Amino acid sequence: MRTADLTGLPTGIPEALRDEGIEELYPPQAEAVEAGLTDGESLVAAVPTASGKTLIAELAMLSSVARGGKALYIVPLRALASEKKAEFERWEEYGIDVGVSTGNYESDGEWLSSRDIIVATSEKVDSLVRNNAAWMDQLTCVVADEVHLVDDRHRGPTLEVTLAKLRRLNPNLQVVALSATVGNAGVVADWLDAELVKSDWRPIDLKMGVHYGNAVSFADGSQREVPVGRGERQTPALVADALEGDDDGDQGSSLVFVNSRRNAESAARRMADVTERYLTGDERSDLAELAAEIRDVSDTETSEDLAKAVAKGAAFHHAGLAAEHRTLVEDAFRDRLIKCICATPTLAAGVNTPSRRVVVRDWQRYDGDYGGMKPLDVLEVHQMMGRAGRPGLDPYGEAVLLAKDADARDELFERYIWADAEDVRSKLAAEPALRTHLLATVASGFAHTREGLLEFLDQTLYATQTDDPERLGQVTDRVLDYLEVNGFVEFDGETIQATPVGHTVSRLYLDPMSAAEIIDGLEWAADHRTEKLRALAGETPEKPKRDRSESDNEPGGFQRASEMVADDGGGGGGDDGDGSDGADDTDGGDGDADAFETDRTYPTPLGLYHLVCRTPDMYQLYLKSGDRETYTELCYEREPEFLGRVPSEYEDVAFEDWLSALKTAKLLEDWVGEVDEDRITERYGVGPGDIRGKVETAEWLLGAAERLASELDLDSVYAVREAKKRVEYGVREELLDLAGVRGVGRKRARRLFEAGVESRADLREAEKSRVLAALRGRRKTAENILEAAGRKDPSMDAVDEDDAPDDAVPDDTGFETAKERADQQASLGDFE
DNA sequence: CGGTAGATTGTTCACAGGTACCCTA
DNA sequence: GTGAACAATCTACCG
């Protein structure tokens, strides 16, 4: 089918496609159009990556918009949202407006309801539905990218429920689901009442094979000799071979998939020695520049290692990298500057990075639940191999698995090359998934009875797949019970209503279990405020700590919220009986609670960080060897700060989790204590990207905690807000004002503060030379910052940093040493 | 013959990923 | 289950 023959698209689009060089549709695309894609028919397209899926989506969305509708494109990853947006924006000149909405990024300008195409993550869409976004019912077309991810244990149910809700809101909605080639695409199509287009067709051939001995044997029967010398490894030989070029002599890039971050880094180090041999002089200098950019992103060992590899033409790629690192690497690889990337599976799921050759080095991965090395799913390996073949550059792509012996070779052929991908199976009927989605379903009014809920759930993929219709009902009952016990829903006969808190929890997008934990923690803090403030002020209770925590039989995280309401504060409550006994006969005359309040905040930041870190919405840090002792000790040291009863070291299985949460909380405390990034990465064995991740999650959860605290009318709102702000900026209390200025991060804020510029107001008043000196003479930066602070005359012309007063030189102000001392304390005190 | 750098072998250790709030001055 | 990092041991070669 020719693009010129397409009908139903906005004026000019077929011509524009022709100008892009798209005259003829690919077979799967043509099939989709014949199935009614441009007439509003729902469709499941199960086709390989890079075989024109995006155009299928575009044809559906554009024709829908041409009929006066509005389209939504659901992506699985935030990084993909911006990629898709950039792609769709080429239609802007034909009057199509594109908007993006993700957790950390929202299109500015007009509101999303004015946009024709909106790109969002599934979670964001879910959240928008929960918050009744006005434009939801205007949707006429929704595209679900990578719909096979409904199989994902954590995030699949969200996609599934969201699609069900969107279809319920608008029964005529056109649903276009794009999927990898999975076993049971037909079932997905049945679920969505959609036509199925299934195809293995690829615009660029993919040759899959296994390397063993001195050659790769491909599935098509051909062989390619790739000798491996004695003591040499297979992967570098394959990377070098690709770089040697094929018949056309064109240099081929390689993508190497391994099973751990460390392996990615060490493999990249080795590959760098290979790629280095194939660089031209120009490439060397471009790479040196790129390496410098990478070093600028973050001052950490990871950053340095990456820069070193990149300078030689190779790179590693995993989630420990900062987002900027990843983008730099991906772009340079696409520009053919970087010749080889060694990556964990992140890359296979992320933005488009095609490569001449893909080497799947490790096909097993450690899995704690599984209890050892687990073979990768066929689908996952196919996704990796599908990255082979750069359109317009390679005659075909090569995907190679590695075998040590003939048996392994045969097994790999059997297991991955000849095998079809697994079926997708809904993971909805699990308690964690239903906990959050049932509450949301009730709260946003999709159902008000148990039967209504089950009827709604009947529209999900789970329902069309299950052989055990009872199961969903059972889990639903358990979950409803949980939600009621925790005060998120109320039963009135048959009807179920969300309570006000329940509504808030749903809108905040919290797992109800996280919300329960946070509420319990904050209310516990309100109940134990006086006692804990005394402990924090150094007044040791008579009884030893452990003894007290055992007698302190507060209910845990599962009790009714109604039982938790703070008592009238008289101190006569039975629960702080032994606390006040101990505190009453301490020395000193200033033992009253009011005096504590002036110089101590409660809850403390660490207490709050720990609270949100032990929530199921926070991904906790691993406990490594030795950490158990370190954090057990810290746990006793900081015992008064925790919001809730500390589980027993000896009896409680929860203690381990408590420590992991403590380690994570401690990372956050270091972050807000202005400990250097590289110090944090070293201390916790994480990458710069992990720090950003933890910080972001903590920000979100503390924001939610703040909302809950204010709704429950708890004093801790202020402490929570401050803890959140400090996490946001990564600074101590005194820098909060400064760090709020655009262009001022934690480092610059500290430098300005040390130079005597201590607030936003100071920025407007201070001598310019002082500001300039604090910013190391960076004029442009200084101007931008002054402007952002609202200074009338930000110009730095004719200002000399050497004119700065003596006290503006950080070294002799004493602030520096004060900070260093605090740093030392933070590190030495608790660790070395 | 002792000393030492470098190679070899043995042992221990840790192991992927990443979404979500509020809001329309 | 396995690669990497580190430790312990061995080996070759030197003065």
Image (tube, coloured by chain):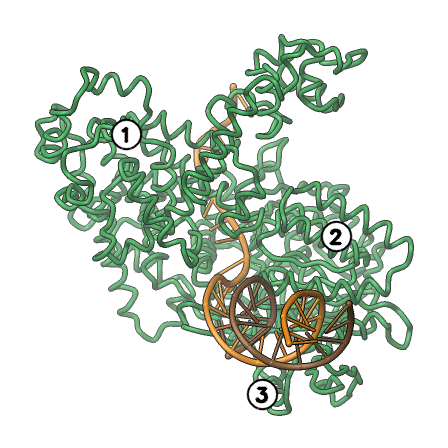
Chain colours: A green, B orange, C brown
Helix, strand or loop at disc 2?
A: helix
Expressed as whole percent of the image width and height from the top left, the position of residue A140 reads 56, 50
Where residue A331 is drawn, which disc sits there?
2
Q: Is residue A739 above or below residue A542?
A: above
Expressed as whole percent of the image width and height from the top left, the position of residue A407 reads 60, 91
Instruction: Give the residue displayed 44% in from the left and 32% down from the top.
Output: A724
Disc on the earlier residue, 1 or 3: 3
* 10 Å crowding of disc 3: few (<14), some (14-19), many (20+): few
* 10 Å crowding of disc 2: few (<14), some (14-19), many (20+): some
Disc on the earlier residue, 2 or 3: 2
Which sits in the foreground, A732 or A467? A732
Give the mark count: 3
Query: Tag 3, which chain?
Result: A
Instruction: Say left or right for A541 vs A166.
Output: left
Amino acid type of the residue tagged 1 in the rendering = Leu
Q: Is residue A132 visible?
A: no
Which sits in the foreground, A515 or A306? A306
